[in-house]
Amino acid sequence: MTQHGPTTGREWRLVSRPQGMPVPTDFELVEVEVPPPAAGEVLVRNLFLSVDPYMRGRMSEAKSYAAPYELGKVMYGGAVGEVVASTVDTHRVGDLVLHQQAWRDVAAGPAKEFKVVDRLVPPSQYLGALGMPGLTAYAGLLRVAGFQPGETVFVSGAAGAVGSLVGQLVKAHGGTAIGSAGSAEKVAWLTGELGFDAAFDYKAGPVADQLAAAAPDGIDVYFDNVGGEHLEAAIGALKVHGRAAICGMISAYNATTPPAAPRNLMQVVGKRLRIEGLLVWDHHDLEDEFLAEVGPMVADGRIVAQETVVDGLEHAVDAFLGLLVGSNTGKMVVRVEG
Amino acid sequence: MTQHGPTTGREWRLVSRPQGMPVPTDFELVEVEVPPPAAGEVLVRNLFLSVDPYMRGRMSEAKSYAAPYELGKVMYGGAVGEVVASTVDTHRVGDLVLHQQAWRDVAAGPAKEFKVVDRLVPPSQYLGALGMPGLTAYAGLLRVAGFQPGETVFVSGAAGAVGSLVGQLVKAHGGTAIGSAGSAEKVAWLTGELGFDAAFDYKAGPVADQLAAAAPDGIDVYFDNVGGEHLEAAIGALKVHGRAAICGMISAYNATTPPAAPRNLMQVVGKRLRIEGLLVWDHHDLEDEFLAEVGPMVADGRIVAQETVVDGLEHAVDAFLGLLVGSNTGKMVVRVEG
């Protein structure tokens, strides 16, 4: 089916580069006309948009591992939507598709940029537990950090999209999971609902002290989503031949001066620690294995795929800003039609 | 042959724990009586003692990967000597032996603690190019950092015992070697005698600027002997999937406050860097391979086994203090009989 005539859509553009914490006026919601799909293209109405910590990096001009968002242009990011018009047999109207044209309600482009997915789980979970954050947790824990059953893992940002998966994968693979989060409620959720062995509120006292209390014998693996004081505490707690997978350092994303670095980094020598950065891009070869193992556990609830849903495309920036201060539990997503 | 009656020897003891840079009064040279070897033991007259940066760590009380030196007791360390009395067939008088009872002229103990070595190279080289520093360079470069032919390696402390071997191994394996050292003379020696592709004097300007000039396309591997500003510069210069083997951080050994840590550590994520600590202890399984490859190259001069020799046991502390401020080129050793 081909749709005739343009469709009206809305998209979020970056209009100024944030200094420190972004503010709403750095963004603008604009109405646009989306032309009907040309040959080989599809038109998609987005159901859910992803907001993720990495997007803060894209808002800065500084060279990074990916191109920065362009000023005055729509921002990109993960989304899941339904095909509403198609020119190809592989994508039929009504198909659920996963793609990277987010921060908008109507997406269009070459069909190959839209991956058709099944409906075994609610659509938004393809942005979270079964999507990029889930694969990040899986690859970071099992491949980069080389986690082995019986080991003790500390994960920061444990109530977030990636961290909550890390802890649950540790438990599913026979390890001890210790998490930090930013409120007593999140801590209770980690040990109550998710089965973490221990958790603490990093705002309630020094991370090093709380980690030592939770893991008196030390840790084998640190999964870092936070950086700063957390990384320093983890380096102190890591055992000989311990590994740290560095997934993100959200504590530093809005810093306007270089963030505090671990003063105890010299311990990497004596303890022969390995500190390794992690980007999900490098690990798409694990995707089939990941979906085969984690998909059924999410579908039947053995793994809790917690989400914080913000309703309405017009609140996407609010959702993103909330993410940066930890107002989410689990994956933060935006339901396009609020 | 068994010797009858005690032998008089001298040994260096640590008598106070240094605060910051050690001073001569932290040490004391004492005369001792060494009893004749009991059954299963040998008596050894040391020819050369090793002084190494790691010894600074042993002088502090802080828990480390090895026990601290005890106050009022002789310090340990590598040495090479000759058997002067033996009770076992495996060790004959005149045999050259390598062992860990240094900071003294006469050593005694169970024969199994004294490894008999051949005389294919001058004895002192078993403390340097063919000893612990050599194996450290070999294992750190080839195993920990995973160096591959064609890659560019930056090594700090490049004129030292380990660093000078790292650069020469890089060249022997078909890579590009870039080194930093602490004087124009050392820099000239690195590029002149040792075949480094580039080198710079870290005291002559910011490390990051000089490294960028020497390696405009970045580096694949950083071999760290220095830490601090060097590590930060290396993180900035490492390419995607670059590796840093952390062998030591001599810039921090005498620090009385926590040393500066790399403010750009967040780059490990975007560039998926691996930073890994290195202790030679973990790599003794490589010793045969190392000696088979590097031994002949040292013996025939393809690898320069440079030494700085300080004469006289009574100057061992001077040698050690000199090492900490970089007065050596190549391996610093003490010839016991000056």
Image (cartoon, coloured by chain):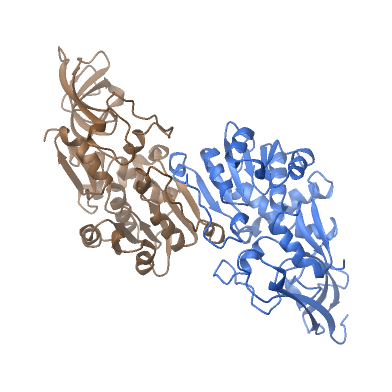
Chain colours: A blue, B brown
The residue lying furthest to the bottom in this view is A5
- Figure check: A119 above or below A60: above
Report the front residue among A273 and A60. A60
Is residue A132 visible to us here? Answer: no
In the rendered image, the quadrant that contains the N terminus of chain A is: bottom right
The residue lying furthest to the left in this view is B338
Residue A316 x/y as whole percent: 77, 67
Which image quarter: residue A67? bottom right
Is residue B227 visible to us here? Answer: yes
- Figure check: A281 above or below B298: below
Which image quarter: residue B258? top left
Residue B96 x/y as whole percent: 20, 31
Residue at left 76%, top 62%? A319
- Figure check: A293 above or below A314: above
- Figure check: A320 above or below B126: below
Residue at left 41%, top 62%? B151
